[in-house]
Amino acid sequence: MRTIFISIFFLSCLVISTSPAFTEEIYKRNVSDGLSISDIEKDLKITKQSIQEIRRDQINYRIEKEILKEMYSSEINTINIIIAMILGLFTIIGYIGVKSVGSIKDEFRKELDDLIGLKTKYEKKFDEMDRFHHDSKNELETIKIVSEDQSKRLKILEVQEKTGSLISNQHYSRALEYLYAGLTIDENDTVLLNQKAHCLMMLRRFQEAIDVFKKLRQLEPKAINHIVNLIEAYLLIRRADLYGEAIKKYSDQIMEKYPQKLIWYYELIRLYIEADETSMRNHILNGTSKSDNEKKEHIGKWVFHEIENAFSDDPPSENKKMLFNAIEYFDAKISGSELREAINA
């Protein structure tokens, strides 16, 4: 295109330079310059040839222009066709692309829905597995606890059995060793604690036994037997004051569970501690009958070994004689009438 414009410009310059006005101007200039006719004719001939060349060039220009015009027009059409084809191609591609995107979108949505469904399904499965795991873990913990409890209980039962056998054979110190071991397994086992208190009483370690009875009272506050054992222990350490406070507080409960002779027995020991011989004799006479010839256990299966063991080292006295005769009476070895005769002898 730039070449065409340059050619047109030069041709325009040639036309202007060969116009009649221009030629006349040259002629006048030559005449004024004193040129000869032959020179002028020569110039005219040259000018004529130039004009012919210019015309020929004009014709060639027109032809070239037409050719260029046709070529340009053809190129424009070709370009238009190419642009149209490209636009058509883009339209087709766009249509296919939009259709493909829509199809992909639908497929993606379907896949997404499927994934959501799978997610929900597996979340449900995971929840079930989590619950199963949690339940299994709880069951295993329960089984473990039960197993440990059973194992612990079996060990404690073995200690109880072994300790009971040793106590029966009066091996109290040896029994205590087993009891200490058993209480490390379960320090609140009441059977072991009762056995320990009994061993301590038989070994005359009364204050330690009192501490055990107090612990038993905390573990089993409604058990009256711990109260009566504690009261007896106060008498064995010769603390009539502590005994008086306890018997005043718990006498009604003791009377509901045990025979009346139990408190009568406690009062006899209190009088012995206080060394009141007259009151002690009157207490025995008032609590027995001349016609009582039956030998029986007046306090049930009560054990009097602790009392005998606690006061056996006391020096001989009338009070000690009456106390031990009364123990024989409670232990069903003599009758009431025989007890009365023994203290009056």
Image (cartoon, rainbow, N blue to C red):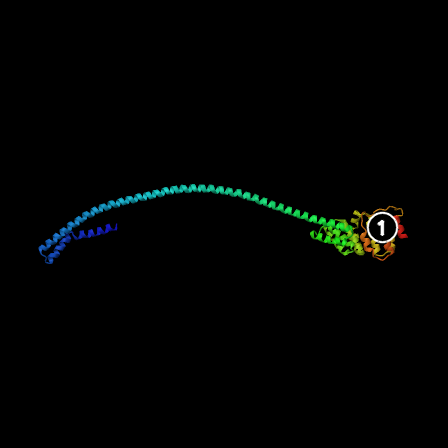
The residue furthest right is: 345
The type of residue carrying mark 1 is: Glu
Task: Tell me what residue is drawn at x 18 percent, y 48 percent.
Answer: 58
| Residue beneath disc 1 | 328
Which secondary structure, mark 1?
helix
The percent position of residue 47, horizontal first and vertical second, equals: 14, 52
How many tags in the picture? 1
Task: Tell me what residue is drawn at x 64 percent, y 46 percent.
Answer: 143
Q: Residues within 10 Å of mark 1 (few under 14, many from 20)?
A: some
Residue 74: quadrant of the picture: top left
Left or right placement of residue 92 versus residue 313 in this view: left
In this orientation, which residue lies closer to the viewer: 60 or 177?
177
The percent position of residue 215, horizontal first and vertical second, equals: 73, 53
Left or right placement of residue 246 versus residue 74 in this view: right
The percent position of residue 225, horizontal first and vertical second, equals: 77, 49
Left or right placement of residue 8 versus residue 147 in this view: left
User: Could you tell me if residue 38 is visible in this image?
Assistant: yes
